[in-house]
Amino acid sequence: MTQEQLEDLQYLIEQSKTVEMTEDEISKQRRSFAYGNSVFENSKITKEMVDEEACRLGM
């Protein structure tokens, strides 16, 4: 990685620290994370299944 790339990356990291996510964004990110990790283990898992379980759990 070049010095310029490292500086760009550091800048992006610092900028990301100021981002305030809404509850909706947090929920979407949580579901995406759950789906990504679940489908890796079981290809039969769908996004709809994750959404249904999240709703059932009140998330």
Image: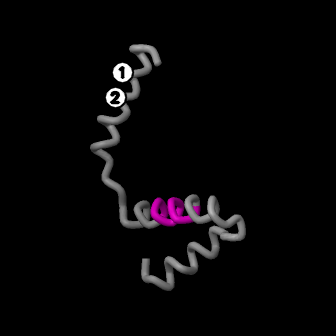
Q: Residue at x 62, y 76 (%)?
A: 49
Q: Which amino acid, by three-letter code, is at mark 2?
A: Tyr
- Secondary structure beneath label 1: helix
In depth, the one of 24 and 45 nearer the eye is 45
- Range of residues picked out in magenta: 28-35
- What label sits on residue 26 in the rendered view? none
Q: Residue at x 45, y 83 (%)?
A: 57
Q: Which amino acid, by three-letter code, is at mark 1?
A: Glu
Mark 1 is surrounded, within 10 Å at the Cα level, by few (under 14), some (14 to 19) or many (20 or more) other residues, namely few
Q: Residue at x 29, y 35 (%)?
A: 14
**Residue 25: % across, % down:** 43, 60
Report, in whole angstroms, how far the alpha carbon at label 1 lies from the one at label 2.
6 Å
**Residue 33: % across, % down:** 50, 60
Q: Is residue 32 above or below residue 53?
A: above
Mark 1 touches mark 2? (CB < 8 Å): yes
Tell whether 36 sits left or right of 28.
right
- Please check the rendered image and state whether residue 14 is part of the magenta-colored stretch, yes or no: no
The residue that mark 2 highlights is 11
**Residue 18: % across, % down:** 28, 44
Q: How many marks?
A: 2
Tell whether 26 sits left or right of 48.
left
Q: Please tell me in which quadrant of the rendered image residue 43 appears.
A: bottom right
**Residue 39: % across, % down:** 64, 63
* The residue positioned farthest toward the front in the image shown: 41
- Secondary structure beneath label 2: helix
Q: Please tell me in which quadrant of the rendered image residue 23 appears.
A: bottom left
- What label sits on residue 7 in the rendered view? 1
- Please check the rendered image and state whether residue 34 is part of the magenta-colored stretch, yes or no: yes
Q: Residue at x 64, y 73 (%)?
A: 48
